[in-house]
Amino acid sequence: MPQSNLAPHRHHCWTASALACLFFAASTLAASLQPRIIGGSPPSEGALPWMVALVYQEEPRALEGYACAGTLIHPQWVLTAAHCFADGRGNIIASPDVDVIVGRSDLTTAEGLRVTPDFLIAHPDWAPSRYFSALPFRNDLLLLHLPAPIDWITPAPVSGPTYDDFSVIDGEYAIAAGWGVTRPWSSRSSPRLLYADLPIVNQETCQAAQPSLTVLDTTLCAGPQDGTRDTCYGDSGGPLLVERGSDAQWTQVGITSYGQDSCAQPGMYGVYTRVSRYAPWISDTACRPEERPAAPILHLDVDGYGVSASIDAVTGANGYRLYYATAPAMAPINYLELGSATRFSTRLAAGTDLYVAAQAYNGICLSPYSAIQRLTLP
């Protein structure tokens, strides 16, 4: 299938021709365009342990069989891009011949583990635009289930639910990682995992710079204006990460999805699936009932303009988020990441009027919200 001038920027395009899309499991299954890191560097040893490579089962050499990237977000679940598993008409291939490699940053080595997933679940509203002939991809995410838990790697932290643009800030420092090509139109993946720092770009700037693309509110844009760093072919499905929490740990906020056909162009930006919009679906799909914490109990105390929040510890939770919104429907909504802390204090301005709730989480597994409380200051 020939590529259009707008390609899934983060996808690895494979066929007999370097410019034609590869077939995912057989010649009738076209792989999505994949991006790779341009202007990147290898991370320090063990820095991104939850990165996974998706490779074709029929190819014993991981580098030659590399297709897409992903992240281990749960001992038995990998998060990646849906377009990595779509055929030439955009239909998800139910049983692709793909293996997951975990614990291996250099694909030329035999480190880590190679495992065959037993099933996959694409987002139910996955929708390619006109069968890949135009972008954007909509709801470009997919979960791969592993037959046994990977209990020797701590899963990647993932953004909690938000429904506005404040979960990431224009200009905020982010990184993307993958094994994609390091030069535009190269046909060879990087043997080593690479990452690059990519500033977040607001939706308006991203749309204005790329009027032929439709930038959805379920996506994020990132990249430097000078085009020196970018994801590219082969990076599809990999993470976009920002530092979050008091311990500044890398947290996944995006999934490499698409961009302009030629990577790393000045004034052009990569587009990433916004993970926060899909956190409830990820939790509902991947988590067993016993993995989801109970709803926490939130206490608010107001002293003048000082406000303190405390949360009763919940069995099975390893973190908490304090949500706030200007309407009782909790939309638009944003949150403070508390990590394992159960107390938070701050001073707020006069006239503050917010609706506040707490949520506990166990990795990607979310509790129900606490009872919503109104916080009003004179």
Image (spheres, rainbow, N blue to C red):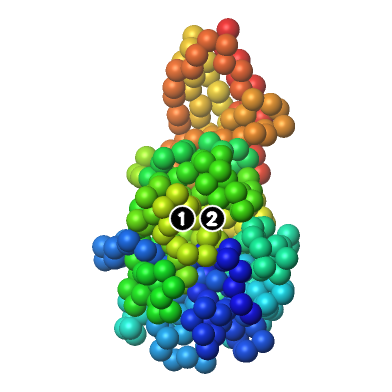
Placement of the C terminus among the 4 image quadrants:
top right
Kind of residue sitting beneath label 2:
Tyr
Q: Residue 127 in the image: x percent, y percent?
A: 71, 62
Q: Residue 184 in the image: x percent, y percent?
A: 41, 69
Read off the residue under disc 2. 272
In depth, the one of 144 and 290 nearer the eye is 144
Q: Are marks 2 and 1 in contact (CB under 8 Å)?
A: yes
Q: Is residue 378 visible?
A: yes
Give the residue at the far left of this rendering: 44
Q: Residue at x 64, y 21 (%)?
A: 374
Label of residue 240 in the image: 1
Which quadrant would residue 77 be assigned to in this image? bottom right
Along the horizontal axis of the image, is 292 left or right of 239? right
Camera-side mark, 2 or 1: 2
In depth, the one of 130 and 180 nearer the eye is 130
Q: Residue at x 46, y 85 (%)?
A: 65
